[in-house]
Amino acid sequence: MSDDEEAEPKRRKKGKRKGVSKKQAIVLIAILGILVIGMAIQHFVIEPLYGETVEEKYARCITQKNVLDERFVECGNALRACEFQLNQCLEG
């Protein structure tokens, strides 16, 4: 072998890197931070401007559901009462 070949440093094989580089970690943390800040702004600034928050909408929805459930039970009772009266009329 000649001196030139020995003088060149051996090249390392590029293998798979393990983990995430510092730059990638910083970018990911920055993206997550921006998302969290955006969600906080939406929850505390934008939603109150609409006048009705998610909690208020949920409470209104539950109230409407309860009223509709009561009406459904009343309709079922009225239907049974009508059937009973019809049967009595048909028998009599």
Image (tube, grey):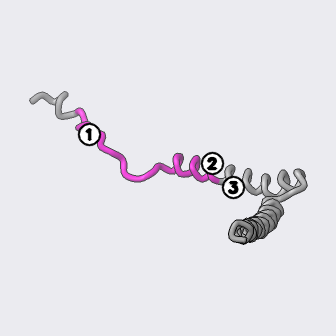
Residue 55 visible in the snapshot? no
Which comes before the other along the chain, label 3 or label 1?
1
Q: Is residue 31 left or right of residue 21?
A: right
Tell me the mark number nearer the camera, choosing from 2 and 1.
2
Residue at the spot of label 1: 13
Quick one: quadrant of the N terminus?
Answer: top left
Q: Position of residue 54 (x, y in %)?
A: 78, 59
Quick one: quadrant of the C terminus?
Answer: bottom right
Tell me the mark number nearer the camera, choosing from 3 and 2.
3
Tell me the mark number nearer the camera, choosing from 3 and 1.
3
Q: Does residue 33 sit above or below 77 in this rendering?
A: above
Which comes before the other along the chain, label 3 or label 2?
2
Magenta stretch: give its range.
8-32
Q: Is residue 16 left or right of residue 46?
A: left
- Report helix, strand or loop for mark 2: helix
Q: Position of residue 41 (x, y in %)?
A: 79, 53
- Report helix, strand or loop for mark 1: loop
Q: Amino acid at mark 1?
A: Lys
Q: Does residue 66 sit above or below 31 in this rendering?
A: below
Residue at the spot of label 3: 36
Write down the quadrant of residue 74 in the picture. bottom right
Say which residue appears at 81% left-offset and 60% top-offset: 57
**Total marks in image:** 3
Residue 74, label in figure: none
Is residue 52 covered in magenta?
no
Say which residue appears at 75% left-offset and 66% top-offset: 82
Q: Are marks 2 and 1 in contact (CB under 8 Å)?
A: no
Residue at the spot of label 2: 31
Q: Amino acid at mark 3?
A: Val
- Report helix, strand or loop for mark 3: helix
Q: Position of residue 25 (x, y in %)?
A: 53, 51
Q: CA distance from mark 3 to mark 1?
A: 40 Å
